Amino acid sequence: MAEKEKKLISTKSRLVEFNEQIKLSLNNGIKFTETLDILMNTQDKVELIDAAMSLMGYQLDTSYLTFPQKYSAADYCLLFFNRLMDLHDNETAILHFSEPRKALVHEIPGINAVDSFSFKIDDSDGAYYVAQESGASLFYLNLRKRMIRINSSAITNVLIVSYLEKLDAKAIKHLEMMLIDFATYLKEDYGFSVDLNLLDSGNPARYELAEDMLKRDVIDELFVLASENELMVEAGANNSAVLKLANSEITIYDQKQMGENDNEKWVIAVMDTTQEISWFDILLNEPFIRNWYLNNISELSIKSDPLIFK
Amino acid sequence: MMKDNQFSLSDHDEATNNIEFALSKKVEYLNQLREAIKQQDDRLVYQLINQSRYAQLLLKKRSVSEMAVQEELVVKDYPQIQQYLSLKLISYLRDAYPFFYFEEMTVGKFKIHFGNWWDRKEFGYLDVLNVEFKFDEEELAKLAKSFELESTNKRVNTDKINQISTQNKERQELVDSQDERDAEKDKIREEMKRNSQEKGRPWDAGRIREERRVLKERLTKLTEMDEEANSAYQDIKSSETDVLSLAKEDTLIGYERQSVIGVFGDFEKFTKHNNELYSNYLSHLISQKGQVTE
């Protein structure tokens, strides 16, 4: 008798427990949909980034309730990207559901014929913005650590080497501007730490070479090429090389000799009156400099944040 | 008595006069030089420190005034005098030779850089005291040669670069023809094998031996070519560096040539102006002074 009663009680409590768990799971699901509503619709930038971070780490499934249809952390990150652009009335990229990949991708007018983009999440809540065709990471984004880092070698390989063969410079410039705008919004709206790297068009920007030393031969080659293009590489102060173009001035120099650093460290600087021209723009628009740079890429490649891009 | 045995001494008054006169001449010279410097009269300074050069080159005369003997008084002061004179001289040269850049190495000693371009050449020294360029003869000869080659549309290193390019083309062909050589070697080895197995009649022995010798020779030749092909890639790489440095020199000389043409028109006028720099400069100083006093 006591045995039977005990069994009955335990069965009942199991049912209660089950019911409670279903309720919790459903509530969890409701909360999820509310957060997704926020991510999709809010006009508030703080709510937006909080929703994105919350969804990227969201445990939607429980042992009582699983949802067969789901989006991934990478999708929410991409959605955040798009919404932030929306809030600034900047609609450069189109969010598109890729049927074969069952995931969201970015399609960029002018680029979509050759490539599309999506995020790849790493194990420390960071996300790499990946060009699908090459698998190269154009930048690294971490919403929690409030940072974004441009990857110079991927930008060079994908935008300069690969796209320029198939696309016109204007479409590539469009993509460049989108990346710059996104990083700028992150900085202005949320105080992100931003490294635009070779996309930085400010005059104080110094594009550091991955190799500290630079052989004179490499500059000699630019000197000869410039002369063939009716331009002159001039001797600047402290062993620097200066190349004046129509709207900008490039200086290649050793920071040690210039008194800016204790150790030998060669850098490239690009100056222009409106501060709109970056090293990337030079590579995009000046064929002989691009050829020189790519021919000597082992010597000249621009350094990216070494903690992120190894 | 003793007195008579003494040598007679020269007249003391005369000696006094002589040395006084000599010293007063020196003082007069130094005063004049000091005054010239005080007045910033560089023309006069030039005249005083080297009278014969002044007479010869500017006045076209051989005569030298007595003051010339005093010039050696200031030999030890040359560095400072050069430093003093360099200000006006270099400002004149910057106008007359806008492509020359003067770097002061030690007090009053100036190195000439040709141009403002990357890796511009050191082209020699400026002799401030004599208002004279001491050009690097080798570099000057290269510049002269580029003018000689003007009509042929060639640059100084064009032939050398072409020669290396031809050589590289041959090297590349050697690398590219490796497969053909391998096939030919196989064929020769076959033939050698056949040759060694050939049992000819006694009178064939000579022919067989000769055949073998020819085959061996061909094989050796092919093996040598293989070795060359092995090092060809490295040779091509290192000759690319040579071509770069030759092309760079051509570019440098090209800029030098354009600069000379831009200012002087041609090499002859440039050379003439260099050779007459002293009189050109001093005439310039004279004409400037005229302007000031007028």
Image (cartoon, coloured by chain):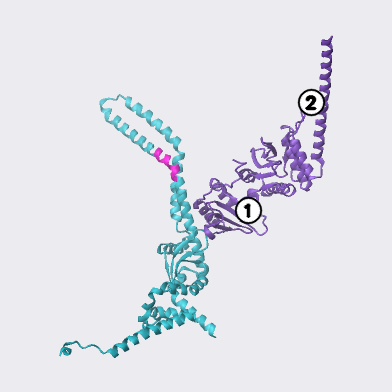
Chain colours: A purple, B cyan
In the rendered structure, which amino acid carries the disc numbered 2? Answer: Leu
In the foreground, A282 or A149: A149
In the rendered structure, which amino acid carries the disc numbered 1? Answer: Ala
Q: Residue B24, image x and y in percent?
A: 37, 86
Mark 2 neighbour class, 10 Å CA radius: few under 14, some 14 to 19, many 20 or more: some
Magenta span includes B84: no
**Residue on which the image places disc 2:** A65
Magenta span includes B231: yes
Residue drawn 27% across the image and 30% down it: B206
**Residue on which the image places disc 1:** A205
Q: Is residue B65 visible?
A: no
Q: Residue A60, image x and y in percent?
A: 77, 30
Q: Residue A253, image x and y in percent?
A: 55, 55
Disc 1 secondary structure class: loop
Quarter holding the C terminus of chain A is top right
Q: Which residues are magenta?
A: B225-235
Closer mark to the observer between disc 1 and disc 2: 2
Q: Which mark is residue A267?
A: none
